[in-house]
Image: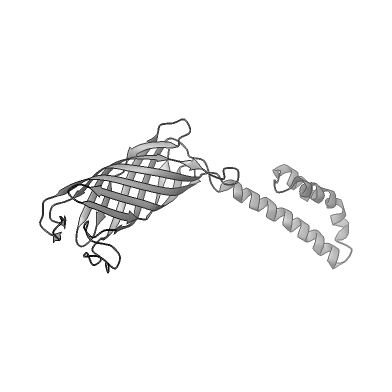
């Protein structure tokens, strides 16, 4: 009866009928132990299956938690790849543009945001980004709006998809140069652009205070004396309190 008591105490969830079957089978288990190897193997397998079901259920309950509170902070890193010839040149190999690969930058973002709704899903915040390469740099000073949409909540807690919009200014500092309609300029004055960024991502709260994230869709659009566009892929982690 030890197995039966163990199962009832912990209320294993996989199938209640299976639990009752194990409980009913507990008394014959002791008798089966003395009637040859096959019944003993069957009884031992049933016990092992019950223990494994309990362990899997306990693990599933520990993985994923809802957010702890409305305050969120993130750090992200990834590449920023130029998509046009003017704004630093096209990224990656640069074979199709004048930049010859100059348009690919290393990017990082620091973000703080606060949820303004009762469900802690609608975030407003500030997320400056810094992008550098051997040829030029970009500083994006943007405000952000993000809305978390929780998915498969009945199976996994803390899994969200989110659309995101960032709006602010993009600055190309003096000394790094930028394309000004006449080619790469290594000593031009700083250029300032209106910066609109459209993003989409996913995050998973492993614990209520810690999450990991990925944003495979991020398109900064720079509008000013000229037009520029980039593609970014963010990976990061953050906290919730």
From the viewer's perspective, tell me whether residue 1 is left or right of residue 144: right
Residue sitting at x 84%, y 52%: 25
Q: Residue 207 location, x and y as percent? A: 49, 45
Q: Residue 58 location, x and y as percent? A: 63, 48
Residue sitting at x 38%, y 48%: 199
Q: How many marks?
A: 0
Q: Residue 69 location, x and y as percent? A: 45, 35
Please state which of residues 205 and 138 is positioned toward the viewer in this rendering.
138
- Quarter location, residue 112: top left
Quadrant in which the C terminus appears: top left
Please state which of residues 65 and 202 is positioned toward the viewer in this rendering.
202
What is the basis of the colouring in this image? one colour
Residue sitting at x 35%, y 47%: 198
From the viewer's perspective, tell me whether residue 121 is left or right of residue 136: right
Q: Residue 133 location, x and y as percent? A: 23, 60
Please state which of residues 174 and 227 is positioned toward the viewer in this rendering.
227
From the viewer's perspective, tell me whether residue 50 is left or right of residue 96: right
Q: From this viewpoint, which residue is outermost toward the top?
A: 118
- Quarter location, residue 216: bottom left
Q: Is residue 44 above or below residue 154?
A: below
From the viewer's perspective, tell me whether residue 238 is left or right of residue 11: left
């Amino acid at each position: 009866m030890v197995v039966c008591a163990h199962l009832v105490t912990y209320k294993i969830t996989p199938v209640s009928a299976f639990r009752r079957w194990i409980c009913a089978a507990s008394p014959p288990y002791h008798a089966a132990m003395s009637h040859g190897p096959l019944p003993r193997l069957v009884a031992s397998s049933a016990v092992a299956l019950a223990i494994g079901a309990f362990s899997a259920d306990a693990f599933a309950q520990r993985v994923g938690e809802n957010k702890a509170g409305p305050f969120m902070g993130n750090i992200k890193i990834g590449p920023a790849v130029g998509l046009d010839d003017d704004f630093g040149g096209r990224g990656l190999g640069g074979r199709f543009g004048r930049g010859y690969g100059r348009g690919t930058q290393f990017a990082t973002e620091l973000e703080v945001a606060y949820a303004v709704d009762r469900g802690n899903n609608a975030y407003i915040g500030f997320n400056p980004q810094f992008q550098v390469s051997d040829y030029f740099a970009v500083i994006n000073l943007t405000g952000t709006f993000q809305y978390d949409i929780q998915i498969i909540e009945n199976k996994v807690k803390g899994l969200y998809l989110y659309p995101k919009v960032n709006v602010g200014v993009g600055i190309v500092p003096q000394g790094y140069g930028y394309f000004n309609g006449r080619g790469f300029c290594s000593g031009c004055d700083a250029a300032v652009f209106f910066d609109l960024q459209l993003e989409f991502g996913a995050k998973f709260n492993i614990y209520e205070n810690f999450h990991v994230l990925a944003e495979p869709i991020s398109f900064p659009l720079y509008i000013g004396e000229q037009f520029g566009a980039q593609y970014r892929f963010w990976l990061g982690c953050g906290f919730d309190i």
